[in-house]
Image (spheres, helix red, strand yellow):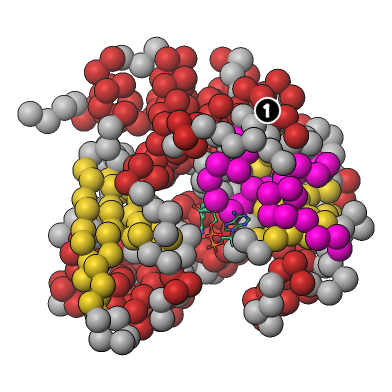
Amino acid sequence: MTAIATHEELNVYESAEARFEIAAKQLGLEEGLYRFLKYPNKEITVYIPVVMDDGHIEVFIGYRVQHSLVRGPCKGGIRYSPNVSIDEVRALASWMTWKCAVVDIPFGGAKGGIICDPEKLSRAEIERLTRRYTAELSEWLGPEKDVPAPDLGTDPQVMAWVMDTYSMHLRHTVTGVVTGKPIDIGGSRGRREATGRGMLITCNKALERFHLKPSDCRVIVQGFGNVGSIAAQLMHETGYKIIGASDIHGGLYNEKGIDIPKLIDWVYGQHKPLPDFPGGGERASSQDILFRSCDVLVPAAVENQITSQNAHQVDCKILCEGANGPTTAYADAILQEKGVFVLPDILANAGGVTVSYFEWVQDRQGFFWRENEVNNRLKDVMEHSFDEVVQVRETHKVNNRTAAYMLAIRRVASALRLRGIYA
Ligand code: NAD
């Protein structure tokens, strides 16, 4: 059993701030710009009335935080979860600013969330909740203002409802108001796989540094949703051996490797619990799987999985962060001391927002690309961003996370200096 990290350590907003502070100090960022970039631009709270299926009215609390508009429209997912809080949304919004800047796409950061348990709502209730949330926010959203995407608990169908509601208010179809939409209504080919594909690309680059081949690598993936299952699938296809996988119901560990296509069919085709996968391997808890020996560890579920209380148990060469904020700021130093090569979230999982950017470009052009065109452009962006982060790491003798933040803050600060402060 691992001890519990403190409340302060687990506050994701404080974790995000701690990383920002380290990188800003290292960069020698001016006091005024530091103050400007530390705070969000705008925070909106909405109380969303929904008529439930049984006829009673429920009121849900929703947020949208726009952290930065300095480099372009705000960009960031919408999360439906009982654990949503304003601090979490604030942290996720600022991470989006840095993530977009690391991969050098012309967006600022935002995030939205509704405190609800989507597992306990019917599809019709989720649709009404989504439409009313969108209607409440409609003046703040738009292709030139703020462009949501799916996140935990939301999916392409939810994005379709956001797009439709916004379009009904404007009286014409505005596909570019959200990304991660179904392909039939302006979504991009390759978007569904983009976050996992970006993770594969950055892992492949990291492997070169260790002179390892994918077939030499044992991988453990925590979280088997959009990000985790697709990363596992693409890594499996590339020759990596996936020896552990878990979701909220528990995990499986198998030294010989798990048959990932069959596991995906079990979980998504047959809708069965992941740990019940026949012949899958030894059962493990969702969290214990993180501490088995492997070469590449992929936390792709939720925040705060690797903390000061358990980081010493992590036994991998490469930590590829699929989730946002899976590692606390307190755990960073322990991982660094252990020599773990961290692919930080704002780099490793940036493939999703990169193809979201491609989707926004395609919607605005009204011209849609073939899947290999999307994937090739994504590869180019991810490889280039990886090289840039490593270059900052080597020049400033910092770890990868601080290097990624430095690269991002430098870009946003430069745009801010050029624009100046409007008075
Ligand atoms: P999802 O809802 O599709 O999947 C989440 C998965 O995590 C599910 O398998 C769930 O069972 C599992 N899970 C939840 N709590 C867990 C726990 N305590 N232990 C183990 N497993 C647990 O969500 P997703 O879109 O795959 O997002 C996962 C993470 O990746 C989030 O942090 C999200 O912010 C981040 N992310 C997502 C995208 C994207 O394109 N979807 C892009 C960048 C980052």
Dot 1 beta carbon under 8 Å from ligand 1: no
> Is 171 placed above or below 408 here?
below
Quarter of the view holding residue 1: top right
Q: Does the magenta stretch include residue 132?
A: no
User: In the rendered view, does 40 fall on the left or right side of 321?
Assistant: left
> Is 317 placed above or below 172 here?
above
Query: Residue 83, position in %: x, y?
Result: 43, 54
Q: Does the magenta stretch include residue 289?
A: yes
Return the residue found at the far left.
423
Query: What's the amino acid at mark 1?
Result: Leu
Return the residue found at the far bottom.
54
User: In the rendered view, does 207 fall on the left or right side of 401?
Assistant: right
Query: Residue 288, position in %: x, y?
Result: 73, 48
Quarter of the view holding residue 121: bottom left
Query: Residue 6, position in %: x, y?
Result: 51, 32
Q: Residue 326 or 122: which is nearer the viewer?
A: 122
Residue beneath disc 1: 335
Is residue 231 in sight in this rendering? Answer: no
* Magenta part of the chain: 281-307
The quarter of the picture where the C terminus appears is top left
The count of marks equals 1
Residue at position x 25%, y 81% in the image:
56
Quarter containing ligand 1?
bottom right
Residue at position x 28%, y 54% in the image:
63
* Disc 1, SS: helix
Is residue 53 in sight in this rendering? Answer: yes
Q: Residue 389 or 344: which is nearer the viewer?
A: 344
Q: Residue 114 or 370: which is nearer the viewer?
A: 114
